Amino acid sequence: MSEIQNSQLNTQNLLPRPPIVVILGHVDHGKTTLLDYIRKTNVVAKEAGGITQSIGAYDITHHSKLITFIDTPGHEAFSKMRARGAKVADLAILVVAADEGVKPQTKEAIEILKESETPFIVAINKIDKPNVNIERTKQELMQAGVLLEGFGGNISWQAISAKTGQGVNELLDLILLAAEIEGLTYNPSAKANGVIIESKMDSRRGLTVVAIVKDGILRVGDEIATATAVGKVKILENFLGERVNELSPSSPALIIGFETMPQIGEEFFSGKVELVEIQPRGEELGEQKSKLPPTVGVGGQPVVSDRQAEQKINFLLKADVFGSLEALSEIIKTISNVRIISQSIGDINDGDVKLAINTKAIIVGFKTKVSKAAENLAKAQNIKIITSEIIYELIKKIEEEIEKFKEPEIKGQLEILAVFGKKSGKRQVVGGRVLMGNFKNNLVVKIQRQEQIVGQGKILNLQKEKQDANQVNEGEECGILLETDILINVGDHLIY
């Protein structure tokens, strides 16, 4: 059979497939509200209750036609995940709030869409709010390079209220129209392939992977592979958590059967494939190399040298799934004087605490639980564990901890040269020399011992040349009556 005949046969075998849609935009502009409204009003009530948030994708029906939505996180730290979401998607909805207009993450989303060459529709949201300015929003979009229909361009748009549902049906109409223009198809006789959108270790079910099928039909029993992982489909579930024997494009699939954890954003292929066919491209390979775990020592624990750790705040990261872990890691990497000594998925256990003890690390958990053994060991060894279900709260807590580690600006410093008599209650008489600044009566000072702050005290009385003094200046020696819980030693420093 000639190549032309083969080509005609392949074309005849093609069937239409539903569009895969991702929603992007600035934080708090209503992406999640829009997804929730679409899901609740376009999925049968009985089925809607069965959708698990963890799968991160689901199908809806509009005018008897399917549309697949990928639920991507909205925080700016998740830009990589959003970029991958845009790559796997056929279409995108760019949500812009009519009361705020184009914001930093809006511009970031526009860049992602342009770089990935993803067709998109603009949803101007929150039109139910008072004093919104749709025309200003259109103007700002034009300045950002998004030329809307009726505004000098050909990008479709719809004014909506994700809260009340106004305009949402019309938005879904535009998605179906855009999908028709794109001419999305698949070959039912081709080997199934698609994209990994999530992977995690389930304590009950083991390694679970969420993927979107892009072509072919994925079946239970199929061998499956990505550039970094292989396996066999043992269990296949749809977005409702129902077991199925096969899934066609553009279906979200929960797959159990991978032997090792695939990377988010990787393509998967079913059937017998040569690994060379699915090796990641240069940029992706470089990205994956950067994710290699630190050098490990005995028991699989990362090796941390003293030189590596000095003047750094060590963090040990845990998250529920790889996507969250990657996002959390990207946030922390942007902070100076911070070092990630380990990162993994799953709950925080006593092994994590032991590693934190050895490396003097703070444990950070995103959407993870802390085992009782880990909690008890952490309390006994004074190891800080920070956890949260909300990324914004977690970042705030991390920043607060980092602030504690920053060296305070020292305005005054005094070295203790002598200790006179025994400590009486909270009072102690000492002698010292002012190295910096000046010291006054009633001044509250920190007590520094070998570069560590061990407590604080209050100067009740100063004497200079055996005479009471209100102030002692740099270079001068003095006697001090200090009120403190700490037993002062020669060599300690008083600082403020």
Image (tube, rainbow, N blue to C red):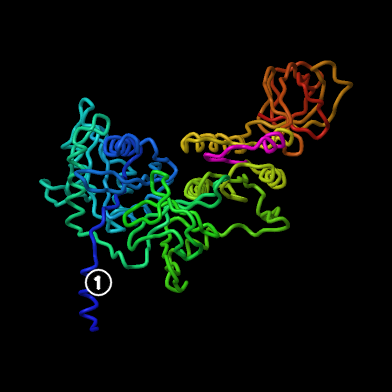
In the rendered image, the quadrant that contains the N terminus is: bottom left
The quarter of the displayed image where residue 127 is located? top left
Q: Is residue 460 left or right of residue 312?
A: right
Residue at image point 24% right, 81% down: 3
Amino acid on which the number 1 mark rests in the picture: Asn
Residues 44 and 173: in front is 44
Please tell me whether residue 370 belongs to the stretch shown in magenta. Answer: yes
Residues 340 and 479: in front is 340
Q: Which residues are magenta?
A: 363-377
In the rendered image, the quadrant that contains the C terminus is: top right
Report how many numbered discs are placed on residues in the image: 1
Residue 229 image offset from top left, x and y in percent:
51, 63
Residue 360 image offset from top left, x and y in percent:
69, 44
Residues 440 and 154: in front is 154
Residue 458 image offset from top left, x and y in percent:
71, 20
Say if residue 64 shows up in the picture: yes
Q: Is residue 106 left or right of residue 170?
A: right
User: Circle 1 sits on which residue?
Assistant: 10
Residue 453 image offset from top left, x and y in percent:
71, 33
